[in-house]
Image (tube, rainbow, N blue to C red):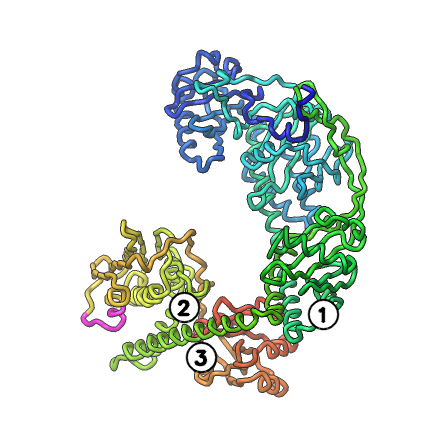
Amino acid sequence: MSETQVDLTNCDREPIHLLSAIQPIGFLLCMTADWLVARASDNVIEHLGRAADDLIGLPAADIFADEALHDLRNRLTGIQGPDAVERVLGIACIASRPGDLYDCALHFSGEMIVIELEHNRREDYVDAASTIRSMMTRLDQPTDLPGYFKAGARQLRALTGFDRVMVYRFDRDGSGEVVGEAARHDIGSFLGLHYPASDIPQQARALYLRTSLRIIADIAAEPVPILPARDAMGAPLDLSLSVLRSVSPIHIEYLKNMGVGASMSVSIIIEGKLWGLFACHHYSALCPSFQKRTIAELFGQMFALKLESRDRQEAAAYENNARRATDRLMASVANDVALLDNPEWVGETLRAIIPCDGIGIWIGAKAACGGSAPPPDAIPAIARRFNALAAGRVFSTDHLAAIVPGADAYAAQAAGVLSIPISRSPRDYVMLFREERVRQARWAGDPHKPASYGPNGARLTPRESFAEWRQEVRNRSEPFSAAEQRVAETLRVSLIEVVLRLSDAAQSERQTAAERQELLIAELNHRVRNILALIRGLVRQSRDSKTRAVDYIALLEGRIEALARAHDQITQDNWAPALLRALIETEAAAYLGGRRQRLEIEGEAVLLEPSAFSTMALVIHELMTNSAKYGGLSDSGGVRVTWSRDALGDLTIDWREFGGPIVKPPLRHGFGTTIIQRSVPYDLKGKAEVWYKPAGFEAQFVIPARYVRQAAMTGQIGDAASQPGSAQGGEAKLSGKVLLVEDSLIIAMDAEDILMELGATEVLTVSTVAQALALLERERPSVAVLDVNLGEENSFPVADALKAAGIRYVFATGYGDQLRLPEAHAGTPTVKKPYTAASLGRLLEGG
């Protein structure tokens, strides 16, 4: 025995999921796949009047009422994923006392079905929906994280009745801190206390990820064995997902040492990782009802989602500000690479991006330092450690002495560091240092758990003292956050580009960039020529001697706008495939407005390649136009669009109109009909068929598989008012003068006509910032339309002047959703080119 190694890994190796016993607050049945009892807890006789041995081999129908068995089978089919647990409230067992109902949890353990039942406590019933809604509302009220943690603990304590509820957050080293608490007034506070990582063994943390709620109703309760303890293969039942799982003797000792009589934990999981726990303690036995525990588990998930949202919002705001500062830094450094030789200036500038106390620069085996930093002769040793630890990656630590021998000698100036590699091979670095932050850590007892033999064998005995123990933490800095490391990665890419000017690879990089630019220009030239050719064809083919000029313009405008909407959608992800559903919804929004129920869409989430997407944009536009004029959408009817893929991957799209006027075949076929019938066969080598049935027009299109991609998401019909191209904006009542800043004469003339149609008394058109600012000194327009890109300048200075003068303005752009406005003008309404009366009218309405 004396040779047995006793260390922290003994606790970590305890098989807490294979204890072959449950807590006596309920009973357990283990069923085979064909619903025969394979195992049962020894206390079933108290609930069903039959011993466990008598139940083995019986069918479930001999135990559960018919309706209860039906519910259990249905819920079992709903289990998705290996760690899912389903719940059923208020089921009846045949052999139980009349009127007795049970709450049930069921899950798979290997190929076995595990059913756990507890008495349904109708006296503890709560309105689950109202309770959750109320709890969530209270979580939204705190403005800071400490208040949020406290609110979460208070809500959970009010629901469950525990004497103490704590929000327990894990640190990077696995230890934890109580960051929020709600407790009985007479039992003191644990807020701010730290607990060592060894208090929660690794296998327990793994189970907290798999099943997010754990209840220990009475630590003094005698475990109830499961019979038989092992199956025919000699294996115990895996109780990892069990809600009644018995408790490890080591953990029972731990709770007794704390004076706790009952406990419950609810996992707080963020991005698939265990962020922390709601740790609930009671100083006598306590078992909240099955329903309240289910609500507590759901509350823990909602708490985590809201916490993640708060963290992301804060991180996003920081990263946005930091990126803007990075852009300013890079603009300065790019103009004068010698600035890298001025560490004081670089450190001051970087400090505005990533808070730090000093900087070290290591380039070409030469060191320079500024601010609070190690001595220059220490920089080479630090750089060598980065070469070995994190070649080519951003790396940070709050304890530099742990990776660099002798670093404790200058910890007061540089206890932590974030390194940014600025060369392709592990050689050159910018290092941001943080000074030592001496602090007093408050521990719940001495964190150094003594290694000793206990009553349960050669393993660690749970510590007995939880009295506050203070520790002075030295040689550590404030840690660098994940958001700061992400910003450092962005900075790394930018700095490498600058430093490459000093390296032998600079010429190669410039040549590669030139080749990329030539390729981009060629691709852009190809696409522009195709677009111009397509528009020229639309102009020629839409022409009809019998059509009035105004109708011809409206028809042509609608077709070009349909192409523009399709172009926006396929360029949102850099000319990538786009959703078919989004195309249909966007086109429908132009006609349906708030009457979206008249369009029925059904089909899996599929993407169309850009070439097919543009073709189908024209086809869907013509179908919608015809339906709105003559078909189902012209009356009180509607349209149903469905699609599916066959075994070869080809996509079949069915268009069916209903409830409209009686359909008759057209006497003549115009360009719109030609687009519908010939575009898919001609452009995509697919198929297209149409039927003029009296009850409603029908069409079918088959798109070859090479143009179709499977999407990982499905969409819903969006708010038509928010869709591009919607014609529901109505006629805006403009008045007075309108300022138009546009550098293209043809586009400006078109926009002038539209603005006059919308009610402007005069349109003041200029093409440059200087002209616009000079005009504003003489005139005061009622509203302004500003093209963002004016050749070699942009219109933001004009927007600044308009904003200062209190004049309403909107932006216009050909960039689509790729446009990023500066912070001063974030949220300003933006219209996408080409201009239309509908799109401009929506933005300017009420001006």
C-beta proximity under 8 Å, tags 2 and 1? no
Q: Which of labels 1 and 3 is toward the front? A: 1
Amino acid, disc 1: Asp
Identify the disc placed on residue 754.
Answer: 3
Q: Quadrant of residue 700?
A: bottom left
For marks 1 and 3, give the CA distance. 56 Å
Which element is circle 1 on?
helix
Left or right, 430 with respect to 500, comes to: right
In the image, 403 versus 353, the foreground residue is: 403
Which of marks 2 and 3 precedes in the sequence? Answer: 2
Residue 499 coordinates in the image, percent (x, y): 62, 68
Q: Which comes before the other along the chain, label 2 or label 1?
A: 1
Q: Secondary structure at mark 3?
A: helix
Identify the element where label 2 is drawn.
helix
Tag 1 and tag 3, C-beta contact below 8 Å: no
Mark number, residue 341: 1
Disc 2 packing (10 Å; few <14; some 14–19; many ≥20)? some
Q: CA–CA distance between discs 3 and 2? A: 22 Å
Q: Amino acid at mark 2?
A: His
Asked if residue 473 is positioned above or below residue 493 in the image, the reply reads: above
Write down the region rendered in magenta.
667-675
Using the rendered view, name the quadrant where residue 549 is placed.
Answer: bottom left
Assess whether residue 173 is covered by the magenta stretch: no
